[in-house]
Image (spheres, helix red, strand yellow):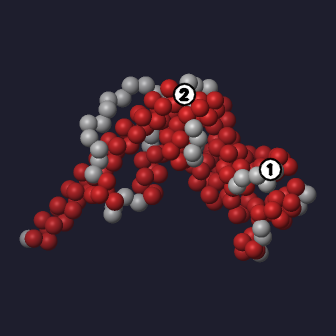
Amino acid sequence: MGLQIYHVADNQLIEGCKRRDQHAQRFLYEHFSGKMFALCCRYVKDKMEAEDVLITAFTKIFERIDQFKNEGSFEGWIRRIVVNESLTYLRKNKSMYLETDIEAADREPDYEALDSQLQADDLLKLIADLPAGYRIVFNMYSIDGYSHKEIADQLGITESTSKSQLSRARVVLQKALMEMETDVKTKRHEQQSGQAI
């Protein structure tokens, strides 16, 4: 039954959801919930809280589906609602403070050395470990494609604050990547030393 989703066009699914057809709603949820849960987790660190955000977001998607006018990407429209719901949750729970002051990274990490070792999951974990304000701005700008103006409007901050949060997030990520690079080189050296004996 779940496989049928891949044979149903978005517009048929949307029309079904507009009619409040429960099968269409379930298909829509099954099709997009995995990706959207991952999106929630990038903003809301606790998985159970992210799940609550996801459920609330899908409730709003079903309530507002009439507002989708078949202009642009349907998935993009869904993503916007999920991001907005994540931000609403963070605002209500006061976990969206913005940080200040961080020393600059003095060099770029060696991305070549990291490339073979660094998986997407590793990078997502580094992003998840960023302080809340950095993480939110980094996610919105670098991953979800919001402009600094949109971020400023959404978060009630200035564009320059958004830019400085992004810049600081990048510094923290660079430092974390450099530490990871050192670990990778150390392990590689230990392996080579062990083989030489």
The residue drawn where x is 32% and y is 42% is: 175
Q: Quadrant of the N terminus?
A: bottom right
* Dot 1: element: loop
The answer to whether mark 2 and mark 1 are in CB contact below 8 A is no
The tag on residue 159 is 2
The residue drawn where x is 71% and y is 45% is: 81
Q: Could you tell me if residue 97 is visible in this image?
A: no
Q: Residues within 10 Å of mark 1 (few under 14, many from 20)?
A: some
Amino acid type at image mark 2? Glu
Q: Position of residue 50 (x, y in %)?
A: 62, 47
Residue identifier under label 1 = 68
The quadrant in which residue 104 appears is top left
The residue drawn where x is 70% and y is 55% is: 73
Q: Earlier in the sequence, mark 2 or mark 1?
A: 1
The residue drawn where x is 42% and y is 34% is: 167
Q: Position of residue 156 (x, y in %)?
A: 62, 26
Q: Position of residue 67 (x, y in %)?
A: 83, 46
Residue at the extreme right of the image, as rendered: 19
Say whether residue 42 is left or right of residue 53. left
Q: Could you tell me if residue 34 is visible in this image?
A: yes
Q: Marks 2 and 1, Cα distance to the nearest angstrom?
A: 29 Å
Say whether residue 77 is left or right of residue 161. right
Q: For this rendering, which residue is in front, 18 or 188?
A: 18
Say whether residue 182 is left or right of residue 21. left
